[in-house]
Image: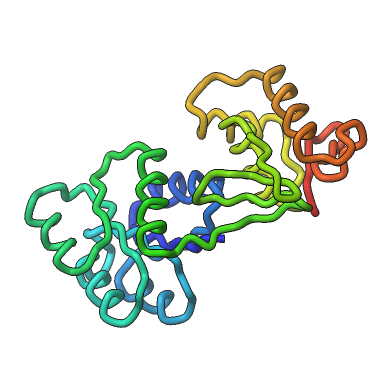
Amino acid sequence: MTKILLVEDDKSIIANLTEFLRTEGFSVQHANGQKAALEMVDEEAFDLVLLDISLSDGNGFAVCSAIKADYQIPVIFLTASGDEYSTVTGFNLGADDYIAKPFRPRELVSRIKNVLRLTGNTGTTLQLGNVLVDTVRGVATKNGEDLFLSALEYRLLLVFINNRGAVLSRTQLLEAIWNIAGEYVNDNTLTVYIKRLREKIEDDPQNPAVIKTVRGLGYKVDV
């Protein structure tokens, strides 16, 4: 799973972006300042850094400079500073991309995947039973065969994978799909999507062993 370090000091952005990226199949940790960010990079291996310029201590330019001096980690600047000076400075320090706030979450994911592809950091495979998900290519396979999941089926699968072991209520699933898909999904539609997903990933959809129903509570996967 791709590990992303989000260096940002806005709590609402941290919460919303972390939830969205995790649902998209990324592992996300965050730091709110220069000192914490560099300590985390020293201690753990990250595949990519999302970096704001304005931080609670220090600044993003210094963080980028330090990361690029010692590590081969892609950096995407994520900031409200969209002026030419900030953009040029970021790229001169070795940043791999630059996206100004406000941004569209799907565009950010696309830019992340593009940077990972260009830098060769594409080893991002998730597994659920005998189903493998390549989160960079957005492809799910079972026993080597493409499952040809629709966009909502794919995102629903990622929600289950990233909440492995937890019971998810129908309300939680509806909220997750709504936030990601940006379109209306009602309770009946959710039932249809779960049925379709089971038909594609389960060996016996009538007796599901992967997406299990927890009566009165919701659904759970723990394989």
Residue at the image position 82 percent from the left and 45 percent from the top: 210
User: Where 103 sits versus 33, above or below?
Assistant: above
Furthest-front residue in this view:
145
Task: Say whether residue 47 is left or right of residue 162.
Answer: left
Counting from the top left corner in percent of width and height, residue 20 is at: 49, 44
Number of numbered discs visible in the structure rendering: 0
User: Where 104 sits versus 222, above or below?
Assistant: above
Counting from the top left corner in percent of width and height, residue 217 is at: 81, 35
Residue at the image position 73 percent from the left and 22 percent from the top: 192
Counting from the top left corner in percent of width and height, residue 63 is at: 27, 71
Residue 126, picture quadrant = bottom right
Q: Which colouring convention does the figure follow?
A: rainbow
Viewer-proximal residue among 172 and 181:
181
User: Where 177 sits versus 56, above or below?
Assistant: above
User: Where 184 sits versus 68, above or below?
Assistant: above
Viewer-proximal residue among 47 and 7:
47
Counting from the top left corner in percent of width and height, residue 8 is at: 34, 58
Residue at the image position 22 percent from the left and 68 percent from the top: 94
